[in-house]
Image (spheres, rainbow, N blue to C red):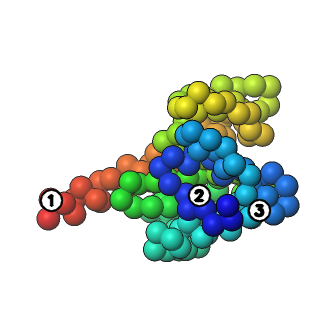
Amino acid sequence: MNCYEINEDTYAVISTDVGKTRIIEKDYDVILDNDAYKIMDESCKYYGSSYMGRVEGAKKILDCSYKLPILVEESSVLIFFPIKSSLLDDCCWINLNSIKSIEKVDNKTKIYFKNGKEMIFDISKLSLENQIYRSSKLESIIFKRLNAKKRD
């Protein structure tokens, strides 16, 4: 499975080794022979843009320039945010709508996913909360714009 498109069941895209990525889905996990950035970029292209196009859009909407959440797919408002800078090889991406709750564990944070899985990430709880906030803000603005278009 080398050609993977992110979808509503994708919970996380996690870099594991060089050129390898773990995909956590609602019902299963899989390791792919691709890096996380390529999977993100190819998925954005599959849905009609590119990773850089999505980043530019998020920059404009959020008036922010680093660790940006991106809208991968419009019709289901599928938003993913990076745990670290997307420029780093070990960047991980989390689906905003897959998170049930989070908990501080030492200097890291445990994410409890809606499917019952849990995973510890090397990010402070405050930083993760900030990423969730930005992603939620992006989601809210997009929803408002979509609803305004429907009313017109």
User: Gap in Å between the C-alphas at discs 2 and 3?
Assistant: 25 Å
Judging by the rendered image, the residue that carries numbered circle 1 is 151
x then y, percent, for residue 67: 64, 56
Q: Which of marks 2 and 3 is in front?
A: 3
Instruction: Identify whether 92 is placed above or below 38.
Output: above
Q: Is residue 86 visible?
A: no
Gap between marks 1 and 2, in whole Å? 29 Å
Callout 1: 10 Å neighbours few (<14), some, many (20+)? few
| Vertical comparison of 127 with 146: above or below | above
What residue does disc 3 label?
A: 33
Position of residue 49 measured from the top left corner of the image (x, y, whole percent): 49, 74
Q: Which of marks 1 and 3 is nearer the N terminus?
A: 3
Circle 3: residue type: Asp
Q: Position of residue 104 (x, y in %)?
A: 70, 26
Q: Which residue lies furthest to the left in this view?
A: 152
Residue 150 picture quarter: bottom left
